[in-house]
Amino acid sequence: MDFFEEQALARKRTLQLVLLFAVAVVGVIAAVYVLAMILYTAVANEAPGLAYMVGDYDNVRELALSFWNPGVFLAALGGTVIVVGLGSLYKVAQLRDGGSAVALSLGGRQVDPDSTKLEERRLLNVVEEMAIASGVPVPDVYVLDREPGINAFAAGNTTSDAVVGVTHGTLHLLRRDELQGVIAHEFSHILNGDSRINLRAIGLLHGIFLVALIGRFLTRSSMYRSRKESSGVVLIGLGLLAIGSIGVFFGRMIQSAISRQRELLADASAVQFTRDTDGLVGALKKIGGATPHSYLDTPKADEASHIFFSDAIRRLRLFTGVFRTHPRLGDRIRKLEPQWDGEFTEVALPEIADGMSTPPDAPPDELNAFAEAPTEEAVSQAIQHIGSPRPEQITFARSLHAALPELWIHAVHQAPMAQAMVFGLLLAHDEVLRGTELLRLAELTDPQTADLALRFHSEAGDRSSGEKIALVDMAMPTLRGLSVDEYRRFAEVVDVLMQSDRRIDLFEYTLSRMIQRHLARHFEGAGPTPVRYRSLRTLIPDARVLIATLARVGSRTEDEAEHAFRHGAQTLQLKESAGVLLPSGGCTLAAVDRALQRYDAAAPALKRDLILACAATVMADDNVTDREAELIRAIGDALDCPVPPFVQSR
């Protein structure tokens, strides 16, 4: 699937969600007005409203005219908008922290990134491998310990605050290949923007569901009142409950509309991702054969049913087809395995020895083969597969994971070492400048941190830029666990190290910005950047800065820089003065920073064209260095366009 097209479609689906929500609210307002008029007429005439109107009016037209009361309508309109609006705003604010808020509301427990439990370690390894292969930060991982069914979910506004959650049944009843298929399915939702829409749907629909909750509360509270007092409360409560049911009906329709087709696409993406149909199909068959299937016990599953891997709640047969948020299991299986005999896999507790098995390590030379200097073909393929990585990327990720020394494994999973690792990756290559940075680092932190950062810097010398980016992605869940004060100190140190040499090292710059960008979204509650630019005309100065900077960083002479810039400018179809290479004075860190910030607010198609132009720039001399290629990955990350690792098709 085309990542940029999917991003554009995701924005259209968001607009459709808002329109459907507006239609549902209009329906609720109309129903509230009818209830309000019945009550108003009954009170005004001291008689049961409906009986009074039917008994006194023979003329239907007169009845209709008498049923219109602007004052009552405004009261119904205002009351409904306030209740639904405040309910939705409350839920949206509650979900401001992104996917973690959903996971916690469902009873999730965050898995310790350094967990040594075999099942949890296997789950974390699979999630880390998928993240590295996709070119995104590793999401936080949650387990719903009290849910025996086989299910999973992904939630989040962006790749920075996304989480992946699985039930206890998923953790313990699936084989590794089945677990990998489920996780690949959830990563597809994250990469294609589905998780963002699903989160917004939870927030908006809560306001509609709140009407029914108020009606239920009033009905129950009438039990503790006198008969005279309770009659009116019961009438209002039952009326709101009935109206709320209408809202719930619309809500379920909306959940079904935004979810069902996306599940089939996510299944297809997962198979394309892993090139393994058996894993995903095996998980679906086990859901059908398990006693609890994929159903959840938590009452919160109702409002979040559309975000799960499979049906999360039981429904009455009468409404199963109308409100179904997922295609039938049989339909999903036959899409992937047309010859399926219709028999589900019987699920039993795994043998104890299964918990001791580990996936085979990759061949020793596999990582080295992938870590060779990237070719033009590898760069081109990676850009074409943004948002839909290939099996080669998963192989690379597993190889990298298996080849990590013990020190680095501890580093990405422990907060003090993770910070020191990042500092080490950003230390200067010049020995004199590095000494100055280490003194400053010791002042801002402590001497032990400075010593550990130097050790990481020394060991990182032989590692490719792709491995370094993967290590930072793996460390993200650990860094999100910092306190606010620790994060501020960490961000200050990263900024100091990036600015220390007063020269443009675009890789270090983009790496530092990548770290701060994803953590800032977590700690400062920043959401996705809204689209403000839909035309290249307004972004031409920013495109010139980025292409010119790439051209100068990868060239040794002015002629080489002009040649590289011309390739990028032609790809973007820049003409006249816009196609002239900027002087070196215009390629400052501040200029690059402004350009990336503005391009982050560009439409998906404009981002795609820029990344293609950046690739053309670095490939202009028919020699793509490891550092140049990874610059494109870092720029893509800054624009929320995760570029997978550069590996050769095999």
Image (spheres, grey):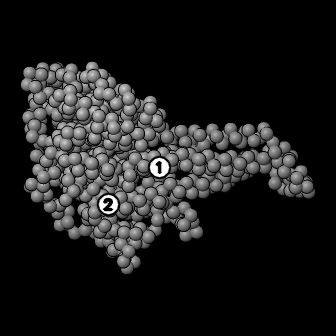
Secondary structure at numbered mark 2: helix
446 sits left or right of 156 in the view: left
Location of residue 641 by image quarter:
top left
- The residues tagged by marks 1 and 2 sit, at their Cα atoms, a distance apart of 20 Å
Residue 445: x and y, percent?
A: 18, 25
Secondary structure at numbered mark 1: helix
219 sits left or right of 568 in the view: right
Q: Is residue 274 above or below residue 20?
A: below
Location of residue 546 by image quarter:
top left
Residue 611: x and y, percent?
A: 32, 40
Location of residue 429 by image quarter:
top left
* Residue beneath disc 2: 272
Q: In this view, does 275 lie above or below 126?
A: below
318 sits left or right of 344 in the view: right
- Tell me the amino acid under the disc marked 1: Leu
In the rendered structure, find residue 9 and report the number of the disc placed on it: 1
Which residue occupies the extreme bottom position in the image?
341
- Residue placed at 23% from the left, 39% from the top? 620
Q: In which quarter of the image is the N terminus?
A: bottom left
Which comes before the other along the chain, label 1 or label 2?
A: 1
- Residue placed at 40% from the left, 47% from the top? 4
Residue 397: x and y, percent?
A: 21, 51
Q: Is residue 291 above or below residue 491?
A: below
Residue 360: x and y, percent?
A: 14, 61
Residue 225 in view, yes or no: no
Which residue occupies the extreme front position in the image?
576
- Residue placed at 52% from the left, 58% from the top? 256
Q: Quadrant of the C terminus?
A: bottom left
